Image (tube, grey):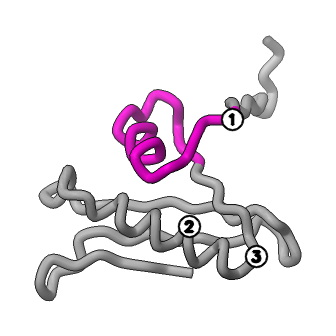
Amino acid sequence: MVFGAFEGDTLVAVGSSYPFEEDGALADMGVVTHPDHRGHGHARSVIRALARAALAADHEPQYRCQIDNTASVKLASRSGFVSIGTWDLPLPGDTE
């Protein structure tokens, strides 16, 4: 799924959601907003619409972001998501 937010005729934010697997229950979602239009609630509107659509399709919406991306973490919280943990992945060749 792909949803967008507009100011007049201008697309200012766009987000997508897709299940991790063909028959998977989790729907991963993300959003990007044009820098000139951040802070106006567009991303939150897109994420909330994606979450409602994912639930209607019997998927569990999941919002993932980098934990040091404070704006994205705030967006998730303001959109009704709660943190359930972090996910650490080793880099190829990493011996530490």
Is residue 3 found left or right of 27 in the rendered image? left
* Crowd rating for badge 1 (residues with CA inside 10 Å; few <14, some 14–19, many 20+): few
The residue that mark 2 highlights is 51
**Range of residues picked out in magenta:** 64-84
Choose between 8 and 95: the one closer to the eye: 8
Q: Which mark is residue 84?
A: 1
- Disc 1 marks which amino acid? Ile
Residue drawn at the location 72% of the way across and 33% of the way down: 87
The residue that mark 3 highlights is 58
Q: Is residue 13 above or below residue 63?
A: below
Q: Residue extending furthest top?
A: 96
Is residue 19 found left or right of 15 in the rendered image? right
Q: Quadrant of the C terminus?
A: top right
SS for dot 1: loop
Q: Quadrant of residue 28?
A: bottom right
Q: Quadrant of residue 12?
A: bottom left
Is residue 29 found left or right of 19 in the rendered image? left
Q: Is residue 4 above or below residue 46?
A: below
